[in-house]
Amino acid sequence: MKLATVNDNGNIKAGMIIGDEFVCCVEGEGADMAVLSIIRTGDVASWDAIIDTAERRDLADVQILAPIPHLIRDMVCVGKNYYAHAKEFFDSGFDATQKETIPSEPIIFTKAMTSLIGPNDAIDASIDPTDSVDYEGELGVIISKTARRVAKADWQDYVFGYVIINDVTSRELQKKHNQWTIGKGLDTFGPMGPYIVTKDEIDDLPSMQIQTLVNDEVRQQTEIRDLIFDIPTLIETLTLTGTLLAGDVIATGTPVGVGIGFTPPKFLKSGDVVTINVTGLGSLTNPVI
């Protein structure tokens, strides 16, 4: 199932995407929280049951929003989690916090929930006073229920589904502050979408490909299997001493090919368009202003 939230001529609606159509399951008051409610209850069957009678709209006639338009907390993110990117970042001169080329333990930070935007919303590069805006195509994991002390073997019990994330970053701010919260938490620097795909629709997670294009030029392309710390390890690590909640989002890291990996760096500028494709999860496109 592909869960989505849309704006239909000023009316917020939640439901499913089937082919080229949006199937409306909830509208009116509470529709902006309906996908989150389904994640918390796990009651996808209630939406399945009305597929044949629900209102349908062509996707071209609605505006697709972030599938969870209002996050419950900041995104949990993982840094330097692909081998080639870890070396790329270490060698770039922007890695002010790490002494290891390849991390020995997961690097965890958070991304402000106020950075969230949806598909086709603009990334506002003008907010960054350092003109060093970079893209990071990532696989996002949606947590299904309260998770504490989760063993690796049980990780799938706590996953609801997956989504595409662009962990947009100001590289100079990331470096200047010796941590990543400020450089990654700017308004509009958290594109997410176009929908959440439930885990039952994913047949081969390690073989899924992430591809990032800037103005139709392929910049990033790799498989999920290349993660340094896989999703079971991340969930075990995060819940060993803390708690994940239903609706939490984990951004699992970005592969090689970010802007700072080029000489000179290829930072985003007004007029650019960033598109991230992930196998089975669709495409997330955002213009830069």
Image (cartoon, grey):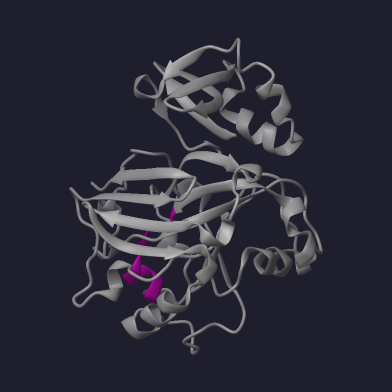
Q: Nearer the viewer, residue 203 or 180?
A: 203
Residue under the image location 62 percent in, 46 percent down: 161
Please check the rendered image and state whether residue 218 is part of the magenta-colored stretch, yes or no. no
Residue at the (43%, 58%) spot, across then down: 210
User: Which residue appears at 52% of the width and 47% of the height?
Assistant: 163
Q: Give the residue at x 37% y 63%.
A: 221
Query: What is the x, y in percent for residue 181?
Result: 49, 64
Hey, which quadrant is residue 154 in on the image? Answer: bottom right
Q: Is residue 128 left or right of residue 105?
A: left
Rendered position, 156 above or below 118 = below
Q: What range of the chain is rendered magenta?
A: 166-175
**Position of the N terminus by quadrant:** top right
Give the number of marks: 0
Would you identify the image quadrant in which residue 132 lies? bottom left
Task: Say whether residue 76 is visible.
Answer: no
Q: In this view, does 161 lie above or below 233?
A: above
Is 90 situated left or right of 30 in this image? left
In x, y percent, where is residue 177? 42, 73
